[in-house]
Each structure stands twice: as C-alpha cells, then as structure tokens.
C-alpha cells in the first residue's frame, strides 16, 4: 500500500508564446481547468502504476473540490481519508510556453488544514510506503514522516518546494527526491554546500538518506548507500512538462511497492515522468503501468 499525504488543487492552465518576465503581462488564447496539486498528482500516478493507493489531504466544500479529485476517483485511489473543510480548495495558476516550460503560482487554501492525524487509522506498517511532498506545512509532513517511520513503513519525501521540508526530519526519510536546484538547497541545509546536484545527492546519501535527483532532459541520478545510478531521459515528443516530477514520484514509488529494487524503480519512475510529458497538464499524459513498461522495453532493444 502507498499512502500519499499531500496537496490537492484545481489547476488553471494558460498557454502563451513566452513566459512573462517580472512585471510583464502576456496573453493566451484560452485556459483549461483540471485537477492538480503535487500530492494528488503523485497519488494518481502511483495508482496508474499499479499500486493500491490511499490519498490523505484536505479540500473545500466548493465546486472545485470534486473537480480536483475526479481523476483520482477514476484511477481507483482511496479517498476515504480526505477531509472537507470550510477553506477554499487549493488552486494553482499555470502558464505554459511554446517549448512546454511552465511558471506556477499556488494558493494553498484547504491544503493548510491537512492533518497528519488522519494517517492514524490507516494501518501503516512494514511493506507500506508513505509518500510526502513540500506543499503542506513542514511541521505536518515531519509529523507524518515520524509516524510512518515508527510504524516500520518506508518514507519517500519529494522536497518540492524546499520551503516545505524540515531537514531535522531527514532521519525519518528513507529516500529523498529532488530536482537540481532542490538538491543544492537541501545540501546547504545540511551544512554541506555543493557545486552541482550530483555531488549534493552524494552528500545527502552519505548523511544516511538515499537521494534521487530528477534532471529533466538529462535523466535521473540516484545515490543509495554510496552507489550511483543514472537513467538517461527517454526520447519523447514533449507537449508540456507540468507534473513530470510528480509522475516520476508516483511511478517510482509504485515500482518499489511492486517489489522492484532501487535501479528498477528509478527506470520506471523516469518512464512515468516521460509519459506524463506527452499530454497537456499535470494529468494529461499516460504514466500508467502499460505505457511505462512499453517505454522501458523500447530502451532495452
């Protein structure tokens, strides 16, 4: 079982010719409204990856709540631990340029009320995984990690954004997932500033927590017990990169849940992240198990 404790949003996505500079207004022809939030995105990807998945979070009582959760329902995610609150459902405002790159502003809303106490009745234990991200409060995520670790579950933390990561809880985290800039930021928090993400991941691993760094078009690097793994990026036609990191986390964790080792899970996480880039929005691609295995199989030929 994978339990995801995290954020859930409704995303407003606008396509533009170029991302705005500070103080600049740019126009797009239209916009789309779809489900998002790093926690919900990762739960969706984990379920598509074949794992029994439970999502724990908070939404409002507004019409956006069901919209934000609809894809999770379709994917078979257990939503029994989602709390309805009087705060508005979280929202993200996203612009995507012609190259598929994006800029995002997030209004947390009900996500600020997500309560780690909701994990207590889920029976987390050995063989289960708790998947966390940095969009909830650092205190809530740290409490959740401590509970899961004490119960004997595996803890995977995607420190995105780093502002939601408390370095003091690193001892409760088995695997830390970061992008290049986040790797450098976490290394600085640990007092071991490094010049490049690979060295930062090695330092984090040396401190006792395995570290994965997603590098976009340059693939993925993973450090586990002093051993380095590298997975090259999959050749795909990119529609946009929204949610690629979340699909990686969901696919990677689902592979671990299915019994793959660190290297096999890295490969499948990278394939899930690539598959997510082939459709629009955070959940527009197809990081399902069949698509992932097709990509993995094609690279082996």
Image (cartoon, grey):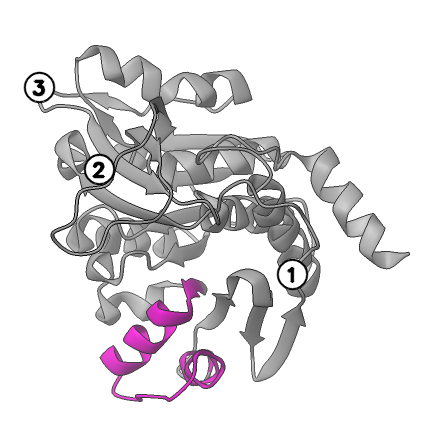
Outermost residue toward the top in this view? 63
Would you say residue 217 sits in the magenta stretch?
no
Disc 2 crowd, CA 10 A, few/some/many (<14, 14-19, 20+): few
Q: Residue 233 carries which label?
A: 1
Residue 2: x %, y % from top left = 49, 40
Q: Which mark is residue 86?
A: 3
First in sequence, mark 1 or 3: give its number.
3
Asked if residue 9 can be seen in this view, the reply is yes
Q: Residue at x 49, y 47 (%)?
A: 244
Q: Residue 40 carries which label?
A: none
Chief SS of the magenta region: helix
Identify which residue, 194 or 204, lies in the foreground.
194
Would you say residue 182 sits in the magenta stretch?
yes
Identify the residue under disc 2. 117
Q: Which residue is drawn at 28% across and 32% down?
A: 57
Q: Which of marks 1 and 2 is in front?
A: 1
In this picture, residue 61 sits left or right of residue 95: left
Residue range in magenta is 176-205
Q: How far apart are marks 1 and 2 (CA)?
A: 38 Å
Q: Which of marks 1 and 3 is in front?
A: 1
């Amino acid at each position: 079982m994978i339990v995801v404790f995290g954020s859930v949003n409704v995303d407003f996505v606008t396509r533009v010719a170029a991302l705005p500079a500070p103080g600049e207004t740019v126009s797009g022809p239209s916009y789309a409204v779809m489900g998002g939030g790093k926690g919900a995105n990762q739960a969706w990807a984990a379920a598509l990856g074949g794992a029994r998945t439970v999502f724990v979070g908070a939404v409002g009582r507004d019409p956006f709540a069901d919209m934000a959760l609809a894809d999770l329902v379709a994917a078979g995610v257990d939503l029994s631990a989602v709390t309805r609150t009087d705060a508005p459902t979280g929202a993200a405002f996203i612009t995507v340029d012609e190259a598929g790159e994006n800029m995002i502003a997030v209004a947390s809303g009900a996500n600020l009320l997500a309560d780690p106490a909701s994990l207590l009745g889920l029976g987390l234990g050995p063989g289960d995984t708790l998947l966390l991200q940095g969009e909830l409060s650092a205190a809530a995520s740290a409490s959740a990690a401590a509970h899961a670790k004490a119960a004997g579950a595996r803890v995977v933390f995607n420190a995105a954004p780093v502002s939601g990561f408390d370095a003091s809880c690193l001892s409760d985290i088995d695997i830390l997932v970061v992008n290049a800039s986040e790797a450098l930021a976490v290394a600085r928090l640990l007092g071991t500033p490094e010049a490049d993400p690979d060295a930062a991941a090695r330092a984090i691993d040396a401190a006792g927590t395995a570290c994965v760094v997603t590098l976009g078009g340059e693939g993925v690097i993973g450090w586990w017990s002093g051993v380095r793994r590298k997975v090259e990026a999959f050749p795909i036609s990119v529609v946009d990169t929204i949610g690629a990191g979340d699909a990686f986390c969901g696919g990677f964790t689902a592979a671990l849940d299915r019994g793959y080792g660190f290297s096999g899970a890295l490969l499948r996480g990278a394939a899930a992240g690539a598959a997510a880039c082939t459709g629009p929005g955070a959940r527009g691609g197809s990081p399902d198990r069949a698509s992932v295995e097709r990509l993995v199989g094609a690279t082996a030929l």
